[in-house]
Image: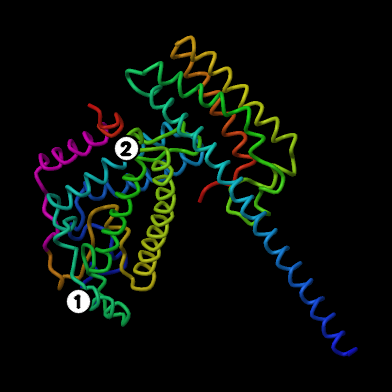
Amino acid sequence: MTVSLGGKRRGLRSAIFGVTALAVVVAASAAAADVLSVVQARQGHFKAIGKAAKAMSEQLKSPTPSVPTIQAAVKQIDALAPELPTWFPAGSGPAAGVKTQAKAEIWAKPDAFKHDAAAFAEAAHKLDLVAASGDLSAIRAQAQAMGQTCKTCHEAFRQRDD
Amino acid sequence: MTDERAAPRRGWGPGIKVWDAPTRWFHGLIVVVIGLAWWTESHDEMDWHIRIGCALLGMVVFRLLWGVFGGETARFSSFVRGPRTVLAYAVKLARGGTSADEVGHNPMGGWSVVALLGVMAAEVGFGLFCVDVDGLESGPLADRVSFQAGRTAAHWHTVLFNALLALIALHLCAIAFYTLVRRNNLIGPMLTGRKRVAASSGEADAVQSRSPLIFLASAAVAAGVAVWAAYGFKI
């Protein structure tokens, strides 16, 4: 009787342990899936910016630049730029075990990161205003200034490709 | 050694002519141009990097033309050998049986040239389509492909540059081996065009002068391709 009861208790304990372990594993993999989707969304946003920047710089290099194409591309960048800091929630860095070129410094030096991101957003907005004027040489100068903010931030916070 | 020309500055001129001037100038220039391409990229001088890449494309075109119309030792038909010849030469090399009087590319060295030229051609080929991570700097043909494709081209541009460095390192090691171990001076002839060889190997030049018109025509085609590339192939 006692033995049998003890057996039941052991069985119950194992069951509780098993369910808990399973829950932990499920939660962990759900978190990993979450991080992955965050990273993929982030990459999607940056690719959208890259695509727009490519469209713009091709026009700026062209002998016959299309100002409306430049304006549309710049609008896209200006719309995305202010959101940039929100694409880097805590826990979406390299420590999460997901393939990302975001450096741990983003979360280690949040003020410096936000400063660089703000510089980009500001430059993108200014570019939008300059683009509206249609003055190509002014657009070129501001596009270069904005490109510098990309580089500055990437230098500090993005792993180089190799 | 019965031939007094064989010692002690063996390998340096006068000797017989083994490399024509365009082949040697191509070699000297490609070293400088690859160095400049590297320097400009690592110093973020992308406008110059792209111009230099276009020049490199022209040089590869020149070398391919010269491999058909150039001096004997520069021609692919003279140095691209079949696997059996290459294997036989490798065995001979391993046994120390190669002669210090060889002229032109040996059967293994010939494939090294093909590999170097092939990787250079692929490297500039991908370079034409490269887009940088910010979407702001791009190769002359990048406007024909998507941002994503341009990024993939940039990835291969990086991979192939490392492959090129590895081939260059192998090339330098082989030269050092021949010069120091086999006492076969490969450097002198590539600088002066001439090599001292034992009289028994023959007195005749291994390469005959070609009409300057052939050189001028090849160089003009190469320069045309370089300039055309620099304008995104749009003229």
Q: Tag 1's secondary structure? A: helix
Residue B3, image quadrant: bottom left
Q: Chain of mark 2?
A: B
x then y, percent, for residue A92: 66, 47
Seen at 39% across and 63% down, the residue is B170
x then y, percent, for residue B136: 46, 31
Q: Which quarter of the image is occupied by the C terminus of chain B?
A: top left
User: Which residue occupies the foreground of this view, B96 or B157?
Assistant: B157
Q: Chain of mark 1?
A: B
Q: Tag 2's secondary structure? A: helix
User: Which residue occupies the foreground of this view, A113 or B13?
Assistant: A113
Residue annotated with mark 2? B54
The part of the chain drawn in magenta is B204-227
Q: Is residue B56 left or right of residue B72?
A: right
Q: Main secondary structure of the magenta part?
A: helix
Which circle's residue, 1 or 2, is located before the other in the chain? Answer: 2
Amino acid carrying mark 2 in the image:
Cys
Q: Is residue B4 left or right of residue B158?
A: left
Alpha carbon distance from label 1 to label 2? 37 Å
Q: Residues within 10 Å of mark 1 (few under 14, many from 20)?
A: few
Q: Is residue B35 above or below residue B141?
A: below
Residue annotated with mark 1? B84
- Looking at the picture, the colour scheme in use is rainbow
Mark 1 vs 2: CB contact within 8 A: no
Seen at 87% across and 85% down, the residue is A6
